[in-house]
Structures are given as C-alpha cells and as structure tokens.
Image (tube, helix red, strand yellow):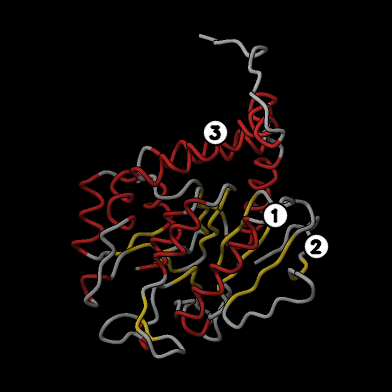
Amino acid sequence: MAAHPSVTWQAACIDGPIHYEDILFDLSGDGIARITINRPHKRNAFRPRTVQELCDAFSRVRDNPAVGVVLLTGAGPAADGGWAFCSGGDQSVRGDGGYIGEDGLPRLNVLDLQRLIRSLPKVVIALVAGYAIGGGQVLHLLCDLSLAAENAVFGQTGPRVGSFDGGFGASYLARVVGQRKAREIWFLCRQYGAAQALDMGLVNAVVPLQELEVEGVRWAREVLQHSPTAIRCLKAAFNAETDGMAGLQELAGQATHLFYRTAEGQEGRNAFLEKRNPDFSENDWLP
C-alpha cells in the first residue's frame, strides 16, 4: 500500500522492540497506530497466536494516551499477487473444539479480540484490500469505520465450513445492513464486491487500492482534530444500544471517568481521605 507522504511509520517500542510473529504494530508519531495482520501466505487468516498478538497490540493502544485512532489492515500482496484483509480463522489449525494453539488447547479467542475492538475508547478504522471473508468480515464489521479498496471482496463462509458467528457477526451485521440482507449473507455465503458493500452500508467509502492507506490516514487525522472525550463517549453511546448491559457498562464507565475529573467528584474522594464529611454545597441540583 502507498504510504502517506507525511507519515513516517515506526515499529512500536515499549522498553525495547515488541516482537510479534503474526502481526506488525507501527506508530505514526502523531496519534495513529497501524496494526497489520502479517500472514499474507495464508490470506491473513488468523490462528490463536495471531489473535493473542492482536489483543496485545490493541491493549497497548488502549493504554497509550498519545494514540487516538487505529488503522487495522492486512499485509499484501501475497507471493501469488493476491490481497486479503483477513480470510477468517485458519482452518488448517482448527481442531474438533476450536483452533489449536501452541499449548495444544482448542480455542476461540477471537471473541476476546472482538470485545476489545468494541470497547476500545478510540476509533478503529478497517482498511480492507482484497478478501474480508468469514471471521475477517466480522473483524472489519466491528471496526468503527471501514474503507475498502476497489478490489475488496466481502462474504461469509461459516455454513460451508461447519462454523458460524451467532454473536456480533450475525446480530450486529443485521443492524448495519438490515435483517434481510444479513440473512442472505449468512444463508447463501455469496461474495460481494466493494461497490455492493458500499451500497448496503457495510463500508464507508471505496477508493483505489494505491490510495487506501492514504485515505485511512486522512480520515484518522480528521478524527484526531476533535475532542477525545467526546469521541470516546460517542463510541460508548453507539455501542450501548446494541451491546446490552455490557454496552451500558461502557457508557456508564465513560460518564464515571468524566465525573472523577470534576471538583464535585474530587471533593467526595478528598473528604474520605481526610476523614471529614464532604461539602457539596457549591454544586447545584441542576435541571
């Protein structure tokens, strides 16, 4: 992908280089992180190690106050010239009970990654070049925004390979594209091009492949011009309507975070530590 001329990506370092096998993790220096699934020979299909590394990178982004936007993408092209954002779970390591990790245990830890992307109080933008299929389609769906290259291909394969995502992959998809279209996507396992994805509201924009990262950086920098607190509270508010009590917990947590930073909230804490009764008399009971 063509890099934006004013971006100099640097590999993320926390007390030294971070060593990943399946992903790349870069920082722009001006508030953007880029997380890349780096298994192009497998069409960027994820295995347990991939998901563990993605969770680690997203957790580091959460804890980095200098980062406000994440670009999630897939490495490419592969040696055969093919592109993929992510083609879902790597079926070659799928056992009888899930995907087999290096510890020999079957896992479906992509659910942890899904929740992490949803709850991250920062904006996640998917940059989709080539295939976003199966679990890869779900990952881009759960990002806050999705930009597609003209060669992007979306679809589900679960019912063909004895799998399905009855969580966000089905319920949230129906919220985005409607019940009828979501059922078509899952029941028929068809594939849809970038223009079709745009028409159904599955992506925000379609751009030429060589401009995909450039456009992602442009969108990220627009987000970074705005209030971090407003953005994080808005993300929690959007999620609260779809994520049940967990979504309400996220929204309430953001409100609590704001309250802690007020003089009123700090008076309650200070009074407790000073072993005195709190004085809230300067705070009005506003309508």
Q: Nearer the observer, disc 2 or disc 1?
A: 1
Residue drawn at the location 80% of the way across and 62% of the way down:
8
Quadrant for the N terminus, please. bottom right
Q: Position of residue 221 (x, y in %)?
A: 70, 45
User: Callout 1: helix, strand or loop?
Assistant: strand
- Residue 93: image quadrant is bottom left
Horizontal and vertical percent position of residue 34: 65, 62
Q: Is residue 23 above or below residue 240?
A: below
Q: Report the side of 147 relative to 20 (left or right).
A: left
- Measuring 59% from the left and 48% from the top, which residue is drawn there? 122
Q: Are marks 2 and 1 in contact (CB under 8 Å)?
A: no
Q: Residues within 10 Å of mark 2 (few under 14, many from 20)?
A: few
| Residue that mark 3 sits on | 255
Instruction: Determine the image quadrant of residue 210.
Output: bottom right
Q: In front here: 85 or 142?
A: 142
Report if the CB atoms under discs 2 and 3 are less than 8 Å apart: no
Report which residue position mark 1 lands on: 32
Please state which amino acid type lies under the numbered disc 2.
Thr
Report the residue at 56% width, 86% height from top.
79
Image side of residue 27 versus residue 159, left or right: right
Other-residue count near label 3 (Cα within 10 Å), few / some / many at <14 / 14–19 / ≥20: some
- Residue 271 vs 279, above or below: the answer is below
Q: Secondary structure at mark 3?
A: helix
Q: Amino acid at mark 3?
A: Ala
Residue marked by disc 2: 8
